[in-house]
Image (tube, rainbow, N blue to C red):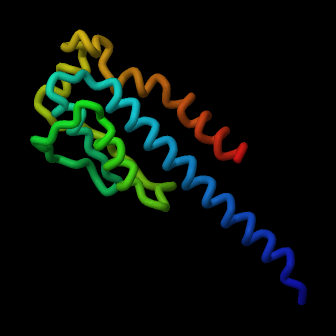
Amino acid sequence: MDNTFSIQVGNWAAKTKEKMHTVVRKVVLDISTRLVERSPVKTGRFRANWQYAYSGAPRYHTEDVDPSGQATISRIAALIGSDPAGRVHTIVNNLPYAIPLEQGWSKQAPYGMVGLTVLEFEAIVDGAADEVKNQ
């Protein structure tokens, strides 16, 4: 019996699954990056407190500072994992002043961060899918 068709279907499924994981990784990282970069900076503490998890919402905050946001983005990228498709991803900032900042309390982010990023969600997903498709 020739298993060529089964092997081809298996290869296609594996390739498709990896592409799904890649798209999800790109989407989570792009959203995280936008949130961090849109965050107002006084000391860098707010930027450093963007937390990521896929096994429930983080409920902590830190005293860390990250004025550029690059360490925070790198930390989140390292946590995303290799098989993120099919999981619920949570990105939160638990500092007590996160909600006022989202509601325009800062002149540096008068329209917040999360709401703007939510408005761009479809474009973020489309961009990630196109990028993976064209690789």
Q: Nearer the viewer, residue 14 or 77?
A: 77
Q: Residue furthest bottom?
A: 1
The residue sitting at 49% across, 25% down in the picture is: 120
Q: Is residue 121 left or right of residue 11?
A: left
Total numbered circles: 0
Left or right of residue 41: residue 70: right
Which of 46 and 120 lies nearest the eye of the viewer?
Answer: 46
Q: Position of residue 38 (x, y in %)?
A: 34, 24
Residue at the extreme right: 1
Image position of 52 (left or right of 106): right
Quadrant, the N terminus: bottom right
Q: Front-most of 47 and 122? A: 47
Identify the image quadrant of residue 101.
Answer: top left
The structure residue drawn at horizontal position 22% and vertical position 49%, both measured from the top left corner, is 58
Q: Is residue 4 above or below residue 133?
A: below
Residue at 28% x, 53% y is 56
Q: Position of residue 108 (x, y in %)?
A: 26, 14
Residue 11 position in % (x across, y down): 74, 69
Task: Tell me where residue 66 sits by quadrant.
Answer: top left
Q: Nearer the viewer, residue 82 or 68?
A: 68
Q: Is residue 41 above or below residue 85?
A: above
52 versus 81 height, above or below = above
Please name the residue shown 51% across and 55% down the image.
Answer: 85
Location of residue 28 with respect to 79 vertically, above or below: above
Percent coordinates x, y for residue 35 in the rendering: 35, 31
